[in-house]
Image (spheres, rainbow, N blue to C red):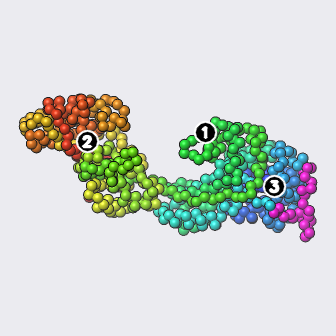
């Protein structure tokens, strides 16, 4: 039994005539019992027809019954048409009627539409008009033939084909925007009826097509995928999309009634996004809407076209520390004027095995600072994190992560990775937080123009907390704003090599430009090593010895 009340009868009547499918009628009667949607639509249709014919048999003949005499029904099932008074007519006739027409007028105008009784008995068994598509005027077929076992099989196959790893999924449904227009049109149709009966009505109580679709499909999809939980929140989303080109133009009148809602955006193909249409429908008055659009909506000739099933797993985040042992390896792909300058990069070397393991479709790489192409990163390495996009596999054990780390390390001698682990999106922000205050240690090979002796440089070891004024270096001026930044060198130490060379160790505030401190950058960094040593100096090699960020947590070997 459908959970319908007496007050629903005129609505059922009216929507059946309008060409709504059985499930859409349940929606507009605000039926929230999921099982009612799951039963075969033919059964629901039968029940609905039986439900309204009861009205006519009982002598509670109010206006609802009057309405029923001009009701239009399309039914494939003659058994359902056991009423003696129902009249059937084509959808086209109903649609061509101005929406404001009172029911009585319609009844008077169309007496010839009344069907002849069948030969068998006096029941008005009427056949469907051949040209009628039977596609629901509101859901455009989505709650009819587009939800059921065949569709569940198709979804199941699409998911299985991609070999995702998941234990639950959320079904998402993308509907053509014009469905909102049709829904609104149908709602106005129902609202008029309810107003006449002084029944309070709230559009929000109408069950959404999406909702009903999910109620129907959850079970069959779960079954296809071996009993996996189909839930409302999951890391894994299976998207079903429908389009209906035939009625795309349904939305167009809204652009003239509510131009504010339809601003062209970069990424969207059409301005008629669902969001924009919903917004415009919230703004438009009923009268204005009805001036531009029929209520109930016109009968379509075809149903929606289901698009390819789209699967998406939320990102997985992986973090670790890397060493870079090569002086000709950029951190990220180095492309100038569309041409690649170096054959590889740190992020690509790290990413390739990770992408393979997680079967992800892409990644975003970030790190705690970065080194120049000719700078090595030694010591414990530089913290990095990667967002793996749409990973088909999302859980690797600690052992598997260890193996993955080994795979990366075996794949190239230019880099090395440690502490590789899966982290949360939130944890990733810890890498960037307080970056300015962190310290970094460097080792630089220095050349001096004037010959030096061991004791000429020892005073440097005593310099502590040296504050530098660094104008944006010339070499990065093309991509960074001109500014003077203060950075602190906490301490330095020297190791004499020969009369023109020594090693300089530095512990600095993150973000200090080391090369510029050494050569002075034409006086743009002050003080600089040239001033301190009273001779021209240059930097021949630079290594990052440590990046003092205590994230990600270290993993014991
Ligand atoms: Zn429908």
Q: Quadrant of residue 455?
A: top left
Viewer-nearest residue: 204 or 505: 505
Q: Residue furthest bottom?
A: 120
Answer whether residue 552 is magenta in the image: no
> Is residue 236 something that shows in the picture?
yes
In space, the residues marked 1 and 3 are separated at their CA atoms by: 36 Å
For residue 448, above or below residue 120:
above
Mark 2 lies on residue: 440
Helix, strand or loop at mark 1: loop
Mark 3 lies on residue: 91
Q: Residue at x 85, y 55 (%)?
A: 71
Find residue 554 and report its horizontal and vertical position in percent. Answer: 29, 52
Viewer-nearest residue: 557 or 288: 288
Counting residues from the start of the chain, the first of labels 2 and 3 encountered is: 3
Q: Main secondary structure of the magenta part?
A: loop
The image quadrant where one finds the N terminus is bottom right
- Locate residue 394 relative to residue 292 in the image: left or right: left
The image quadrant where one finds the C terminus is bottom left
* Residues drawn in magenta: 107-130
Q: Residue at x 53, y 63 (%)?
A: 159
Helix, strand or loop at mark 3: helix
| The label number, if any, that marks residue 263 in the structure image | 1
Q: Quadrant of residue 542?
A: top left
Helix, strand or loop at mark 2: strand
Query: Callout 2: few (<14), some (14-19), or many (20+) C-alpha neighbours within 10 Å?
Result: many
Answer whether residue 125 is magenta in the image: yes
For residue 311, above or below residue 224:
above
| Circles 2 and 3: CB atoms closer than 8 Å | no
């Amino acid at each position: 039994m459908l959970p319908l009340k007496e007050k629903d009868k005129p609505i059922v009547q009216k929507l059946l005539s309008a060409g709504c499918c059985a499930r859409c009628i349940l929606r507009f009667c605000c039926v929230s019992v999921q099982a009612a949607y799951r039963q075969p639509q033919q059964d629901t249709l039968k029940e609905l027809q039986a439900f309204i014919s009861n009205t006519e048999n009982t002598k509670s003949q109010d206006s609802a019954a009057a309405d029923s005499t001009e009701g239009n029904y399309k039914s494939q099932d003659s058994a359902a048409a056991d009423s003696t008074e129902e009249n059937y007519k084509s959808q086209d006739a109903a649609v061509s009627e101005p929406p404001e027409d009172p029911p009585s007028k319609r009844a008077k105008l169309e007496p010839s539409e009344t069907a002849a009784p069948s030969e068998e008995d006096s029941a008005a068994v009427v056949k469907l008009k051949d040209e009628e598509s039977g596609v629901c005027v509101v859901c455009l077929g989505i709650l009819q033939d587009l939800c059921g076992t065949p569709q569940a099989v198709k979804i199941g196959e699409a998911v299985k084909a991609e070999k995702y790893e998941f234990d639950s999924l959320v079904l998402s449904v993308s509907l053509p925007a014009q469905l909102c227009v049709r829904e609104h049109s149908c709602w106005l149709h129902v609202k008029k009826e309810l107003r006449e009966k002084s029944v309070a009505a709230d559009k929000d109580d109408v069950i959404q097509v999406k909702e009903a679709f999910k109620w129907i499909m959850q079970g069959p999809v779960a079954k296809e995928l071996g009993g996996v939980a189909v839930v409302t929140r999951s890391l894994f989303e299976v998207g079903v999309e429908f389009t209906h080109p035939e009625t795309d133009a349904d939305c167009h009148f809204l652009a003239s009634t509510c131009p504010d809602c339809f601003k062209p955006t970069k990424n969207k193909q059409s301005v008629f996004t669902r969001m924009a249409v919903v917004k415009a429908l919230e703004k438009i008055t009923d009268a204005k809407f009805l001036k531009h659009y029929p209520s109930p909506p016109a009968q379509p000739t075809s149903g929606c076209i289901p698009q390819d099933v789209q699967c998406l797993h939320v990102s997985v985040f992986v973090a670790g520390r890397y060493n870079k042992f090569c002086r000709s390896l950029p951190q990220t792909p180095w492309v100038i004027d569309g041409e690649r300058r170096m054959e590889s990069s740190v992020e690509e070397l790290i990413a390739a095995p990770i992408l393979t393991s997680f079967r992800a479709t892409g990644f975003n790489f970030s790190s705690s600072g970065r080194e120049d192409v000719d700078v090595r990163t030694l010591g414990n390495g530089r913290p990095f994190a990667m967002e793996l996009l749409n990973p088909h596999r999302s859980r690797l054990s600690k052992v598997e992560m260890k193996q993955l780390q080994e795979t990366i390390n075996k794949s190239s001698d230019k880099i090395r990775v440690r502490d590789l682990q899966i982290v949360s999106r939130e944890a990733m922000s810890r890498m960037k937080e307080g970056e300015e205050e962190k310290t970094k240690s460097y080792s630089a090979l220095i050349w001096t123009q004037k010959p030096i002796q061991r004791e000429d440089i020892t005073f440097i070891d005593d310099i502590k907390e040296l504050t530098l004024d660094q104008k944006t270096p010339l070499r990065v001026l093309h991509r960074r704003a001109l500014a003077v930044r203060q950075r602190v060198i906490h301490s330095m130490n020297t190791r004499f090599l020969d009369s023109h060379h020594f090693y300089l160790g530095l512990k600095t505030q993150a973000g200090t430009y080391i090369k510029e401190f050494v050569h002075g950058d034409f006086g743009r960094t002050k003080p600089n090593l040239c001033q301190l040593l009273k001779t021209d100096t240059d930097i021949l090699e630079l290594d990052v010895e440590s990046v003092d960020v205590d994230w990600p947590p270290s993993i014991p070997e």
